[in-house]
Amino acid sequence: CAGVTIDLAQTIQYEIDEKIKLAKETLEKRKYADSVYHSYNVFVHSAKLLLLNNGIKYNSQKTVIDEANEIIKGSNIKLKKPFKELVLDIKIELPREKFAEQYLTDALEVYELIKTKINDVIPDSEELVVA
């Protein structure tokens, strides 16, 4: 069973890496709405990784965001504002250059903090690494 979890975690990390690449590429091409969309997916997939690590099942993006928000609130992960607010900025901000850049920066920060938290919990022999 643990092997399946690690495979799923690796798959999620691979998807996050792909979304990061796409967010950066579209930002460089000044396709801000596309970049924001890919950054949003970095947030959501990072949250899925956190839920997987905590054994929490989900069936919607809303559940993913809400559950991750609660886990992060109760953890040592420190963000500039609540996770849910960071993610849902997409609903109140226009996809302009400044927002697209900041949203990607925030998504990358969240992903790195979640990866660090997860890797601190998993023994070295089971470290989640995408090859």
Image: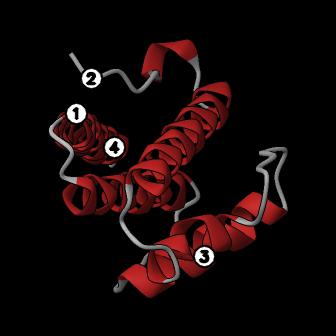
Q: Write the residue at 53% across / 76% down.
A: 88
Disc 2 marks which amino acid? Val
Q: Position of residue 25 (x, y in %)?
A: 17, 34
Identify the mark nearer the N-term, 1 or 2. Answer: 1
Q: Amino acid at mark 3?
A: Glu
> Does residue 110 lie above or below 25 as drawn?
below
Image quadrant in which the C terminus is located: top left
Front disc: 4 or 3: 3
Q: Classify mark 1: helix, strand or loop.
A: helix
The mark closer to the camera, 1 or 4, is 1
Q: Which residue is identified by label 3?
A: 67
Q: What separation in Å lies between label 1 and label 4 (alpha carbons)?
A: 29 Å
Residue type at the position of mark 1? Glu
Discs 1, 2 touching: Cβ within 8 Å: no
Residue receiving disc 4: 9
Residue 95 against residue 124 in the figure, above or below: below
Q: At x 28% / y 47%, what residue is drawn? A: 12
| Residue at the (48%, 56%) spot, across then down | 99
Q: CA distance from mark 4 to mark 3?
A: 17 Å
Quarter residue 11 falls in: top left
Q: CA distance from mark 2 to mark 3?
A: 25 Å
Q: In the picture, residue 17 is in which quadrant?
A: top left
Left or right of 128 on screen, residue 82: right
In the rendering, which numbered label is found on residue 130?
A: 2
Say if 125 sits above or below 39 in the image: above
In terms of sequence position, does the residue under pointer 4 or pointer 3 come before the other?
A: 4
Q: Name the residue carrying label 1.
A: 28
